[in-house]
Amino acid sequence: MDVRPVSEGRSKAVLCLPSGKGSVVRGGNALSEQDAKPPEDGSPVNRQSFGSMDSAAGDSEFLERLEAVWERIDRDELIRFTRDLVCIPSVFCPTNPEGNEARTARYVADYLKEKGFEVRVEEVSPGRPNVWALWRGDHPGKTLLFEGHTDVVTEGRAGEWSYPPFGAELVGSRIYGRGSCDTKGNLAAAVMAVRAIKDSGVPFAGRLLLCHPVDEEGMMSGIKHFIRQGHAEGVDGAVICEPEENQLCVAQKGAMRVEVTVLGKMAHGAMPGSGVNPVTRAARFVVAVEALEREEISRHGEDPFLGYPSITPTIMLGPESGEPQINVIPASAYVALDIRTVPNQSHEEIVARLEECLADLGAEDPDFEADLEVIEERPPTETDMNDPLVQAMTAAYTHLTGESPRYNGVPGATDGTFLHAWASIPIVTTGAGDRTIPHHEDEWVDVDELLTTCRLYAATAMHFCRDES
Ligand SMILES: [Zn+2]
């Protein structure tokens, strides 16, 4: 993202950040014409009266505090911390004792402890610890959570990379390596943002929670554990730190994984009448699913951020297990469905419709027998555009860049899905990184974009927890 300098006298209050150092240009209307003007006599703004004085002076002082926080963000430290994290592999591999998030979690925990945070490390399963840290401002207020997972996906074929996947090489303005974009860079940006607020010593009403769970790329057991332990209680909003090109993603698709086993009766392929063929019956189910998908699309239409819902058969096996043989009708067949949903779609209703499909097929054919199981469910999420978190992020983004943010949706689920669905926390997903780069070879993040993310996180916290009393 580009942060443009804006000349003074424009009708907008814009913060110019051309190359790492923050400065405030106070010009007028975004805050109101008189807001940002220093007192006529040049006297300093009265810090003691913040909160009780009129909103104009309050805005001016708020901007000074925000600038003080931004000045605390150290670009080199952000780069160093990101690179250190990328250098520690955290691919989960159950057959490798080192194949987990433990070292990355320890590194984050040690860093935060050294910087004076209250840190907790909690093992979710052997070798897989969540890390979280709490910082309290000087007076009570809202609680904002920054969430960024510690695990990364496999590097795949390391020989195919142009740079070593765990080398964290800095080439031009890019850091290359697995997790640089998804999401260790953004994890680092969140840590540096909270640290900057803490170290700046600005008055702060509220609490900031850094949450770095394991297993986001798997079953999301880390965030589930964090919520089950009660740590998400009292959280008023959560920033999900993921590579979204610093777009503000206010919606996330839901997901359901469904397995269907169609039962048959084994027989010789030359004598099909003596058996019951589960393969043709599974195929009928797949065709019925296609029709159901069309119905769901016509009922719900296209979501402005998330596109269309889908019901996709991804696996079809016959036999369900064991060696297939061309002259043998198998005993059972298997179909897996990857279902992606948009807000307003009901997962219960979709399961009921799938069961109805099976019941209809059974009514047409007395030999049709099938079992359906939902093996994973991740509800869709939507955060209201008027929610204080969206409003705070919008204000933060506009202050930072002088432009309106671009809003979008996340096509897959994230840890935020569970913070929203299980703990009713409003979420916005944003961070640095090309949206198409995660899980690719030669994954990279641009350090200037990452610096913008760090400032955006810090400004969001300042706006969200702004004391309006
Ligand atoms: Zn991620």
Image: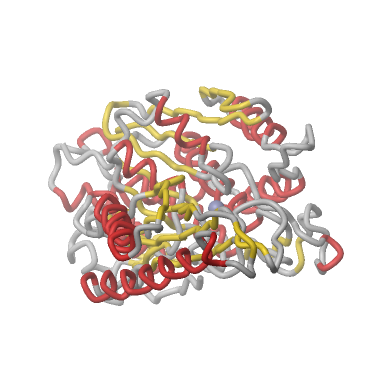
- In the image, 198 versus 300, the foreground residue is 300
In the picture, measured across the screen, residue 316 lies left or right of residue 300, that is right
Up-down relation of residue 251 to residue 406 (above or below)? above
Provide residue 50's location: percent of width, then percent of height: 22, 38
Give me the residue at 69% from left, 52% from top: 322
Q: Nearer the viewer, residue 433 or 126?
A: 126
**What color scheme is it?**
secondary structure
Residue 207: give x, y in percent of width and height.
36, 31
Of residues 175 and 434, which is closer to you in this image?
434
Answer whether residue 426 is visible to the viewer in this image.
Answer: yes
Question: Viewed as shown, does residue 24 lie left or right of 172?
Answer: left
Q: Nearer the viewer, residue 203 or 440?
A: 440
Q: Quadrant of residue 436?
A: bottom right
Where does the image place residue 452, in percent across and percent down from the top left?
A: 50, 60
Query: Where residue 46 sits: x, y (%)?
Result: 25, 39
Q: Residue at x 50, y 35 (%)?
A: 199
- The residue lying at 30 percent from left, 77 percent from top is 10
Image quadrant assignment for residue 126: top right
Say how many tags the image has. 0
Please give left or right for residue 342 compared with residue 171 in the image. Answer: left
Q: Residue at x 49, y 45 (%)?
A: 193
Can residue 391 be seen here? no
Above or below residue 79? Residue 105 is above
Q: Quadrant of residue 169?
A: bottom right
Identify whether 160 is placed above or below 99: below
Quarter placement of the C terminus: top left
